[in-house]
Amino acid sequence: MGQVIHGVNKYNKIALYNLPLSLQILAINILIAFIGFVFLIFFNFFLIKNDDGIEKKRINANQNLKGIQSFLEKNSIIRVPLFNDNCTVENLDTCNNENNFELSDPVLEPKITQEYILNNYLNSDFIIKVYNEDWIRLVDTLDLYDLSSVQEADLEEGDLEKNNLNFIDNFSQQYLSLFLNYYDYLVKSEFSDQISKEKAEISYVSESIKEQALKEYIIQDRDGNIYQYFTAPILSNNKVYGVIILNYPISTQATNLGYVSLNILSFFILFVIIMIFMSLIFSQSLISPIKKLSKLTILERERVSDDKIIYPNRKDEIGILSNEIQNMSTGLKSQIEELEKFSADVSHELKNPLTSLQSAMELIDKDSIAKADKEILIKNVLNDLRRMNQLITDISKFTRLKAEIELEKNQFIDLNKFFDEIPKKFANNAKQIKIFIKKNNVNLQVLGNKNKLMQVFINLIENSISLSPKKSKILIELDKVNEKTIVFRFYDQGKGINLKDSKKIFERFYSDRQENIKNHSGLGLSIAREIISHMNGNISLNKSNKIEYSGACFFITLPVRHSPKLN
């Protein structure tokens, strides 16, 4: 076990997070560059292996061949006029007027054939040859040329430029040469079982005429180059009038792939250089505010400065972190202030009954006081003890509630079902007060802790019961303010609460109750406000708009939240 721990500690010492952040970013960039280079090697392999350019070129060649075949069969197989021996110069016009000429049998007309190939395939990637039925070659694109494409070239100047290639050109040529050699090797391996030796073209013409069908070959010439060959007969009425041969070198397909691979490699190298350069700049803009935040947190903790601390104001994650640290600091200060205020309030609330107890006990201890007065003092002592006991209990509940609110999980609460539980809890109250619930027809939900929300309702209803006459009514309404908000309205028939105290009643230990109302610490509404605030809601005292319910009126607003399962 000791060796394992020692090994773990050893690796922890060389872990990346032990390095400065700038070196971490640089190391990550180098690692990304290495992974990218490995990926680039595999990419080149799959680029060649899964290249569909050969198949696309084959399909394109096949379509072009069929197009040539279709055109020639429709337009080039014609009857040509034959010269009439009976016509002389003297009677030529008469012979022509009398239609004294003959037409040959249908043949593959050379002129139409040559013009079509010249106009459409002179500068194409395909080598096209057309033979007639007598095996005479009528068209060969290798023998056709366009004079407009002929240009003069200075060989000496070209050689000079070739000799003055820079490093980038040399690298590009070397890379393309390596790529093409590898491409040829893979293609020959892939078509090894289909490759046949090159034969005379007449043999292919003969096979096409004999079989009267489109034929396809993969041929390797004497120099080792691989060609795709197609032959197609020119047919009319089941008779062959000629043969079309279309071929092209397969290996030329690698040139475009080579440039794609070269461009990707060049882009990758440029990207790595820019990435490392930008990361160095970025690391400074990242590290500087983090260092500043670290110093600010030390200042906050040690309280070494009386000046106002200014946090970085940014919109990115560092800005979010800055805001969160600032909010956390503000929250901690607020909690400390709240704790100090709470301690002061508790001390004040406990000090009053203790002072009263001390005074009562001092008077009771005297012999000069009358017996009747002693009984009154003893009764006051008992009341103060009960109040202190209730106060300590409520303080304990309040502090425990603050912790529970932060720790307990929330749930989606169906308010209509939630309402069904309320009347049952107060069915047998001592004052026989009836509670009326007015639900909403819409299925409404809120997100919160059900027990804590029930505690709010219990506190409000108990307050209403304690301040309302016997056999009176309490009305609770649920209404929908808008698509995002709902409101609870509590109405009772008690004496009501003065609206000028609408803020004070939610403060801790505040109470305007009569002296004969016992066991009241003034924490109930404060607890209710804490719970509703945690649910992102609001509780307030309002003026009642119902004549029948002229007592206290409380409004609770909460955001509507629906469970995903119910949507």
Image (cartoon, rainbow, N blue to C red):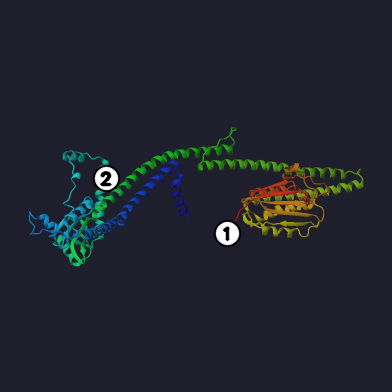
Mark 2: secondary structure: helix
Instruction: Say the numbered circle drawn on residue 565.
Output: 1
Q: Is residue 32 left or right of residue 434?
A: left
**Amino acid at pointer 2:** Ser
| Coordinates of residue 450 in the picture (x, y in percent) | 66, 56
- Identify the image quadrant of residue 339: top right
At label 1, counting other C-alpha atoms closer than 10 Å, the crowd grade (few under 14, some 14-19, many 20 or more) is few
Residue occupying the point 20% across, 41% down: 162
Mark 1: secondary structure: helix
Relative depth, front residue between 431 and 346: 431
- Identify the image quadrant of residue 436: bottom right
Relative depth, front residue between 495 and 277: 495
Distance of label 1 from label 2 (alpha carbons): 60 Å
At label 2, counting other C-alpha atoms closer than 10 Å, the crowd grade (few under 14, some 14-19, many 20 or more) is some
| Coordinates of residue 156 in the picture (x, y in percent) | 16, 39
Looking at the rendered image, the quarter that the C terminus falls into is bottom right
Q: Is residue 155 left or right of residue 474?
A: left
Instruction: Let me know if residue 20 appears in the view.
Output: no
| Coordinates of residue 469 in the picture (x, y in percent) | 82, 53
Relative depth, front residue between 228 and 371: 228
Q: Is residue 100 left or right of residue 413?
A: left
Residue occupying the point 80% across, 55% down: 472
Furthest toward the top, the residue is 307
Instruction: Let me know if residue 150 appears in the view.
Output: yes
Q: Which residue is mark 2?
A: 172
